[in-house]
Image: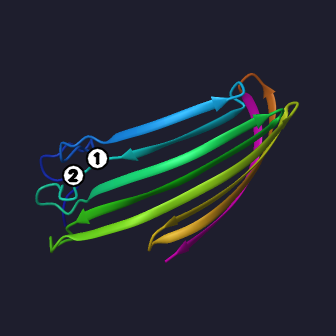
Amino acid sequence: PMPFPPPGEDATRPFQEIDGRPGYSLRGDISFLDNHIQIGGGHWGNHVSSSAVFAGSHFDAYRTWINHIGGKLEWGGATLLGQYLQGGTASKSFPPPLLKPAVDDRGLTAWYGLVSYQWHKWRATYRYDQFQVEGWESGVASTGALSFDVGARQKITVKQGIEQKIAK
């Protein structure tokens, strides 16, 4: 078996730049009506070369990118949030015993919506999430919470969530 980390590598740096190509991100946000309406979106990519690997090892080099857009509406005590994310990840691995490289390329999508209402010292919140990783798994999650504001930076919260994953 291959030791972790590979001989000569620093065990305190599990995520290392292995191909000399820095990642990047772009983001834009805009607000209206004194920040009551906010819209934002962006792109993130790590820009890794699909041929990058640790010499002589079976560790993957992941090439990942994500585009997202989201929004927020606050009015009175009500808050609505939502975000949609689409992206992908590809990895090139050399499974032991260092056979021909395998390329695994998967798309991913996710979104969530949240509604929350503040009434005096109470806040009720509900969130719904859905995700899918192409050819691997998908799922949904639902979470509700009720909070009471005790004082400065102190809250008591009761939260319940339900999650369902579906493996492909």
Asked which quadrant contains residue 36, the reply is top right
Magenta stretch encompasses residue 163: yes
Locate residue 45 relative to residue 115 in the image: left or right.
left
Locate residue 37 relative to residue 62 in the image: left or right.
right
Mark 1 crowd level (few <14, some 14–19, many ≥20, 10 Å Cα): few
- The residue tagged 2 is 5
Q: What residue type is disc 2 on?
A: Pro
Which residue corresponds to the image point at 55% horizontal and 34% vertical from the top-left? Answer: 29
Which residue corresponds to the image point at 47% horizontal and 42% vertical from the top-left? Answer: 42
Kindly indicate whether the residue at mark 2 contacts the one at mark 1 (C-beta within 8 angstroms).
yes
Asked which quadrant contains residue 94, the reply is bottom left
Q: Which contiguous range is marked in magenta?
A: 154-168
The picture places residue 112, in percent across and down from the top left corner, at 63, 54
The picture places residue 119, in percent across and down from the top left corner, at 87, 35
- The residue tagged 1 is 14
Magenta stretch encompasses residue 143: no
Q: Earlier in the sequence, mark 1 or mark 2?
A: 2
Give the prevailing secondary structure in the magenta stretch: strand
CA gap, disc 1 to disc 2? 8 Å
Which residue corresponds to the image point at 54% horizontal and 69% vertical from the top-left? Answer: 138
Q: What residue type is disc 1 on?
A: Pro
Q: Secondary structure at mark 1?
A: loop
The picture places residue 70, in percent across and down from the top left corner, at 59, 45
- Relative to 27, is 52 above or below? below
Locate residue 5 relative to residue 109 in the image: left or right.
left
Q: Secondary structure at mark 2?
A: loop
Which residue corresponds to the image point at 50% horizontal and 71% vertical from the top-left? Answer: 137
Locate residue 108 relative to residue 139 in the image: left or right.
left
